Image (tube, rainbow, N blue to C red):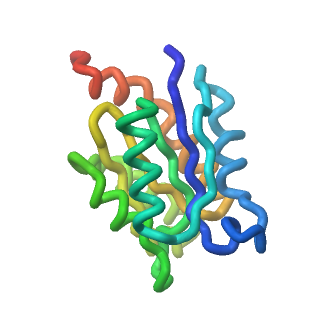
Amino acid sequence: MTIRIGILTVSDRASRGAMEDRGGPAIAAALAPLEHEVVGRLVVPDDQARIADVLALWSDVEGMDVIFTTGGTGLGPRDVTPETTLAVADRQVPGIAEALRAAGATKLPQSMLSRGVAVQRGKTLILNLPGSPSGAREGVELVLPVLEHAILMMDGGRH
């Protein structure tokens, strides 16, 4: 099964070119064990309208199976990725976000400050990951074992 994936980096500085996007490449590298195709990769500022537009386009028009976001999940005043993701969601998948925070907190206590969410929009799973390369990579590694099953379930598959 080939999984169609989008990687969306949310960062004011990276979108302006003032900083290198390191979260997006970390996600791409962590996906190596999967049979996948990265069909969308973009860097946008911390802007709710831009984030929502990309998530909707990639889910509804491009038909991506999974969208990983990286960045914008903290407590900063411009961190709006979780709110925007929830605004475009059909329903939440809280177990993934809970597992990401729990696993992260065993290595870095600040992980419990992440507000990242996991949601379903149509037949697309959208996962918010931290902006740090290590947090993004570890998040992908944690969810890899359930991605194919999640995609099959969203497509009407049986347990």
Snapshot quadrant of residue 112: bottom left
How many tags in the picture? Answer: 0
Q: Nearer the viewer, residue 25 or 134?
A: 25
Snapshot quadrant of residue 65: top left
Residue 140 in view in this figure: yes
On the image, the x and y values in percent for residue 131 come to 60, 63
Q: Nearer the viewer, residue 10 or 116?
A: 10
Q: Nearer the viewer, residue 128 or 41?
A: 41
Q: Residue at x 34, y 67 (%)?
A: 83
On the image, the x and y values in percent for residue 102 come to 43, 59
Residue 64 in view in this figure: no
On the image, the x and y values in percent for residue 34 come to 59, 25
Image quarter of the C terminus? top left
Snapshot quadrant of residue 36: top right
Please say if 157 is above or below 33.
Answer: above
Residue farthest to the bottom, as pictured? 77
Q: Residue at x 46, y 59 (%)?
A: 51
Q: Residue at x 45, y 36 (%)?
A: 66
Left or right, residue 124 beside residue 79:
left
Please say if 65 is above or below 99.
Answer: above
On the image, the x and y values in percent for residue 114 come to 45, 69
Left or right, residue 58 beside residue 15:
left
